[in-house]
Image (tube, grey):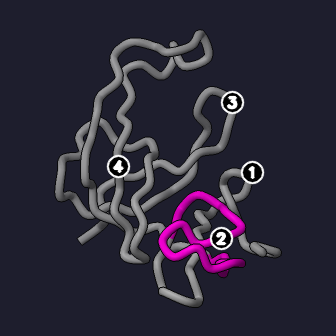
Amino acid sequence: MSGNLADWTKGGEGIVYQSCSACGKAQYFHRSFCAACGAPDPVTKSASGAGTVYATSLVCRAATPETRAHVPYNIVLVDTPEGFRMMAHGDNDLAIGDNVTARYQQFAGRLVPYFAKAKS
């Protein structure tokens, strides 16, 4: 289990993922089994917060009243060096292929991962 690992889904400033002891596959969504091979009890680990932008989409219309104050905002898919892809928020100027790092900020009353270009 994640135990003491910071996890943004629980209000912490960190990204956790799981790694299968049997096949080595990484998965982002928590499960009691490996989605690739079915082995039980994948190990929970802390991600580095680094990644590469795979896709980006600028949201110009609020989905809910709570998100209206944030429009326009960018949603990005990020490939991590740990081997999983995640969806998150990011700077509006991000492009496919940009190297990014995560920080954490409030969005519609919740602390979320937010990606910005990595410092060179």
Where residue 54 appears, as percent x and y from the top left, is: 25, 53
Q: Amino acid at mark 3?
A: Gly
Under circle 3, the secondary element is loop
Q: CA distance from mark 4 to mark 1?
A: 21 Å
Under circle 1, the secondary element is loop
Q: Nearer the viewer, residue 116 or 22?
A: 22
Residue displayed at 65% across by 70% down: 33
Q: Nearer the viewer, residue 38 or 6?
A: 38
Residue displayed at 25% across by 46% down: 55
**Residue 59 seen in render:** yes
Q: Of the residues under marks 3 and 2, which one precedes in the sequence?
A: 2
Q: Of the residues under marks 4 and 3, which one precedes in the sequence?
A: 4
Q: Nearer the viewer, residue 102 or 30?
A: 30
> Residue under circle 3?
109
Segment tinted magenta in the rendering:
27-45
Using the rendered view, name the quadrant where residue 119 is placed: bottom left
Q: Is residue 40 magenta?
A: yes
Q: Is residue 49 magenta?
A: no
Q: Are marks 4 and 2 in contact (CB under 8 Å)?
A: no
Q: Which tag is nearer the camera, tag 4 or tag 1?
A: 4
Q: CA distance from mark 4 to mark 2?
A: 24 Å
User: Residue 77 — which label?
Assistant: 4
